[in-house]
Image: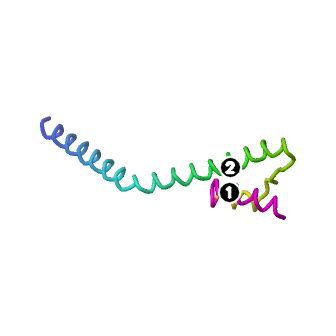
Amino acid sequence: MGLILLFAIIVIGVAVGLISLLLHLLRAPIRLLFKILLHIGAGFLALILINMAGALVGVTVGVNLLNAVIVAVLGVPGAVLVLLLTLLL
């Protein structure tokens, strides 16, 4: 009985250690993914706000694949770029 308990404690300790190591190794990629998703979300929110405010003055930005890619890659500056391109062209 004592040997089985010792074996169970060792297995649990190794499992906790491996999980801790895995979380430590994945911390940076998960943080980077979160920052990228936050950046994309802020860009699309800016695009929506530009369209809502622009509707009051007659300037709207079309939501299409090209604009979506620009905003997804550049975030808020991409939304401003799309707005400036819409105004200039």
Q: Which residues are magenta?
A: 73-89
Taking the view exactly as shown, the residue that stands out farthest to the bottom is 89
Describe the element under mark 1 as helix, strand or loop: helix
* Residue sitting nearer the eye, 87 or 9: 87
Determine the residue positioned at 29% across, 46% down: 15
Residue under pointer 2: 44
- The quadrant of the picture occupied by the N terminus is top left
Taking the view exactly as shown, the residue that stands out farthest to the top is 1
Residue 16 placement, left or right of 56? left
Taking the view exactly as shown, the residue that stands out farthest to the left is 2
Mark 2 vs 1: CB contact within 8 A: yes
Task: Give the residue type at disc 2.
Answer: Phe
Q: What is the x, y in percent for residue 9? A: 20, 40
Classify 10 Å Cα crowding around label 1: few (below 14), some (14-19), many (20 and above): many
Mark 2 to mark 1: distance in Å? 7 Å
Residue under pointer 1: 71
Classify 10 Å Cα crowding around label 2: few (below 14), some (14-19), many (20 and above): many
